[in-house]
Amino acid sequence: MDDRGAHDHAHDHDHPGTTPDVNETGHYELMAEAIREILVEKGVVRAEDVRRNLEFLDSRDPADGARIIARAWTDPDFKRRLLENGTAAAEEMGFTMGDTELIVVENTPDVHNVIVCTLCSCYPRTILGLPPDWYKSKSYRSRAVIEPRTVLREFGTEIPDSVGVRVHDSNADMRYLVLPIRPDGTDGWSAEQLVELVTRDCMVGVTLPQA
């Protein structure tokens, strides 16, 4: 969904208008727990498998995604592969996407990308860790599509009117990752140095990396 009309159907603190409703977040957590218990009781999944998957997700960190971005900034061939097939490129670096497809969208001087999941909270957890509460909130899920520039301003991100804002809607089979524009003043920096500039929020598209 582009704020100029094209449909693409693709921070660590709260901001005005994007603060999640506590009861809403708790509701989804209770639903997930109930479904998990039913699946275990019916023998569809094993409790051990659920525990192992949860431990794996808990071990994931936005630094994993940051390493992918930093390599793309320093390795043109890898960047090309990442944009062509994000899943394969992530696996090339040892990061699995499980049963989902990873699509990497590149910010350019003409287009700024933002990620949302309008139905629930689909998110590239295997490379970014667990999603923040604001990402799961009904406010963000609805307003990011309707008024993306306003939401971005609430995160302190001003996008010029000449730059289109494209909102990508994740789903059960597809995850998105934003490849931000490399900050000015970082020529000659190593991938290890650049990793420090890449935050979770700029890989979701709500902020910009700063040198």
Image (cartoon, grey):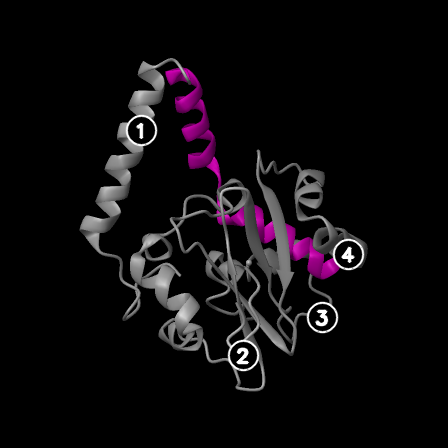
Is residue 68 toward the left or the right of residue 169 in the image?
right
Mark 2 to mark 4: distance in Å? Answer: 27 Å
Q: Amino acid at mark 2?
A: Arg
- Residue that carries the numbered disc 3 in the rendered image: 187
**How many residues crowd mark 3 within 10 Å: few (<14), some (14–19), many (20+)?**
few
- Residue that carries the numbered disc 1 in the rendered image: 35
Lower position in the chain sequence, tag 2 or tag 4: 2
Lower position in the chain sequence, tag 3 or tag 4: 4
Residue 21 image position (x, y, % from top left): 22, 56
- Residue that carries the numbered disc 4 in the rendered image: 80
Q: Is residue 53 magenta?
A: yes
- Between marks 3 and 1 in the image, the one whose residue lies nearer the viewer: 1
Viewer-closest of 132 and 189: 132
Mark 3 to mark 1: distance in Å? Answer: 50 Å
In the image, the segment drawn in magenta is 45-74
Viewer-closest of 131 and 64: 131
Q: Dot 1 lies on which element?
A: helix
Which residue is drawn at the image coordinates 55% and 48% (left, top)? 175
Mark 2 to mark 1: distance in Å? Answer: 40 Å
**How many residues crowd mark 1 within 10 Å: few (<14), some (14–19), many (20+)?**
few
Q: Amino acid at mark 3?
A: Asp
Q: Amino acid at mark 4?
A: Arg
- Residue that carries the numbered disc 2 in the rendered image: 4
Q: Is residue 118 magenta?
A: no
Mark 3 to mark 4: distance in Å? Answer: 20 Å
Q: Amino acid at mark 1?
A: Ile
